[in-house]
C-alpha cells in the first residue's frame, strides 16, 4: 500500500519508537492518530505532525474502541496499525527477597501482550469490513516485539514472555486475516535509543552500543520507523518477525 492518504493508528505514539513512526508516516502523507496514556506528550507529537492525539489504555477494551472510533471519525477508516505501546521491568523469578510478585509478571504481560492483541482484534474488525484496494489488500498491522523474545536475559522472564507471545502470534494472526487481505508483521528491535536508555550515563550508552557487532552503536528510532514504512508498502511481507538489531545476540546478563 502507498502510505500517502492512508489513515494510520500508532499506539505508544507519544515517545520513542512510536513517536518517530508517527512522524515518518505523517511525513509520507498518512493521517496519523497518536494513541498513548500520556495525553500531553501525545498531543505534542500530534500537534507537531498535524495528527490526532487520543488518550488510550491498550489493556482496556472500551478505551481502545473509543479511540479507534474517534480516529475513524476524524481520519476515516484506518488501514495501518502500528503497536508500539509497552513497558519493561526486571525481576528474577526468585531471590533473597522471595519469589517475584505475580502482579509484576501479570502487569508486563497484560500491557505488552494482551494490550497488543486487544488493539489488533478491534482494529482488525474495522479493517476486514473495508473495501479492498486494487491489489486486494485491506490493511496491515505491525507489532513491536523484541530480541528479548529470543535472547532474554536474567531478570527478563516477564518481558521476554510478553514479547515472545507477540512474536508467536504473528504467523497465526496473519493466517487468520489472510482471507481478508490484512497483513500482520512484527519487528524485534535490539538496543535502541529510547527515552529509557537516554536516562543512562553517556558512557553506559556507549558501552551498550559497542556490544552491537555492526554498526557499533545504539539503533536510531528513525531506523525502526523506516522499516515500518517499508513493511506497509511491501505487500509481500506477511506473517514474519524481522530482527532489527545489528546482528546482536544478548548475553545471559
Image (cartoon, grey):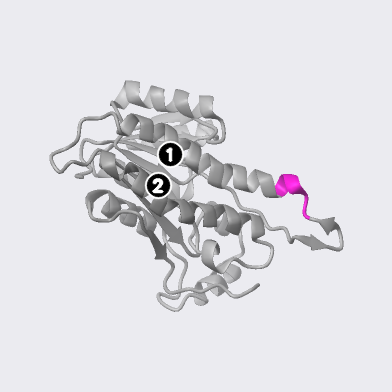
Q: Report x, y in % for residue 73.
A: 33, 20
Q: Residue furthest top?
A: 73
The residue lying furthest to the bottom in this view is 213
Horizontal and vertical percent position of residue 248: 48, 73
Give 193 or 117, whichever is nearer the viewer.
Answer: 117
Secondary-structure class at tag 1: helix
Residue under the point 28% across and 56% down = 237
Inspect the magenta stretch and tell me whether residue 102 lies in it: yes
Quadrant of the drawing holding the C terminus? bottom right
Q: Secondary structure at mark 2?
A: helix
| Left or right position of 191 against 142 | right
Camera-side mark, 1 or 2: 2
| Label 2 Cα neighbours within 10 Å, binned few <14 / some 14-19 / many ≥20 | many
The location of residue 138, given as percent across then percent down, is: 25, 38
Q: Hey, which quadrant is residue 90 in on the image?
A: bottom right
The residue where tag 1 is placed is 120
Is residue 202 depicted above or below 63 in this figure? below
Numbered mark located on residue 246 in the image: none
Image x and y of residue 148, in percent: 55, 63
Horizontal side of residue 84 vs 225, given as left or right: right
**Residue range (magenta):** 100-104
Quarter of the image where one finds residue 74 = top left
Q: Which residue is pictured at 41% across the width and 77% down the height?
A: 214
The Cα–Cα distance between marks 1 and 2, rounded to whole angstroms, is 9 Å
Please name the residue shown 35% across and 44% down the image.
Answer: 23
Question: Overall secondary structure of the magenta stretch?
Answer: helix
Q: Are marks 1 and 2 in contact (CB under 8 Å)?
A: yes
Q: Which residue is label 2 attached to?
A: 173
User: Neighbour class for label 1 at 10 Å: few (<14), some, many (≥20)?
Assistant: many
Q: Earlier in the sequence, mark 1 or mark 2?
A: 1
Amino acid at each position: 500500500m502507498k502510505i500517502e492518504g492512508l489513515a494510520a493508528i500508532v499506539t505508544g505514539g507519544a515517545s520513542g519508537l512510536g513517536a518517530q513512526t508517527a512522524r515518518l508516516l505523517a511525513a509520507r502523507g498518512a493521517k496519523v492518530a497518536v494513541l498513548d496514556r500520556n495525553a500531553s506528550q501525545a498531543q505534542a507529537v500530534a500537534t507537531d505532525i498535524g495528527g490526532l492525539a487520543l488518550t488510550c489504555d491498550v489493556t482496556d477494551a472500551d478505551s481502545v474502541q473509543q479511540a479507534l472510533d474517534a480516529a475513524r471519525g476524524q481520519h476515516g477508516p484506518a488501514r495501518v496499525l502500528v503497536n508500539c505501546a509497552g513497558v519493561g521491568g526486571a525481576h528474577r523469578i526468585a531471590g533473597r527477597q522471595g519469589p517475584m510478585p505475580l502482579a509484576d509478571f501479570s502487569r508486563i504481560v497484560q500491557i505488552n501482550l494482551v494490550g497488543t492483541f486487544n488493539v489488533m482484534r478491534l482494529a482488525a474488525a474495522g479493517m476486514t469490513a473495508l473495501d479492498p484496494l486494487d491489489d486486494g489488500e485491506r490493511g496491515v498491522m505491525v507489532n513491536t516485539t523484541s530480541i528479548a523474545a529470543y535472547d532474554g536475559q536474567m531478570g527478563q522472564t516477564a518481558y521476554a514472555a510478553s514479547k515472545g507471545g507477540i512474536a508467536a502470534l504473528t504467523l497465526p494472526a496473519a493466517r487468520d486475516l489472510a482471507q481478508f487481505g490484512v497483513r500482520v508483521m512484527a519487528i524485534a528491535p535490539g538496543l535502541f535509543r529510547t527515552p529509557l536508555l537516554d536516562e543512562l550515563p553517556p558512557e553506559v550508552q556507549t558501552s551498550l552500543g559497542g556490544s552491537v557487532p555492526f554498526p557499533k552503536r545504539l539503533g536510531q528510532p528513525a531506523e525502526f520507523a523506516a522499516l515500518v514504512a517499508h513493511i506497509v508498502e511491501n505487500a509481500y511481507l506477511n506473517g514474519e518477525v524481522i530482527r532489527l538489531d545489528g546482528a546482536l545476540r544478548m548475553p545471559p546478563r
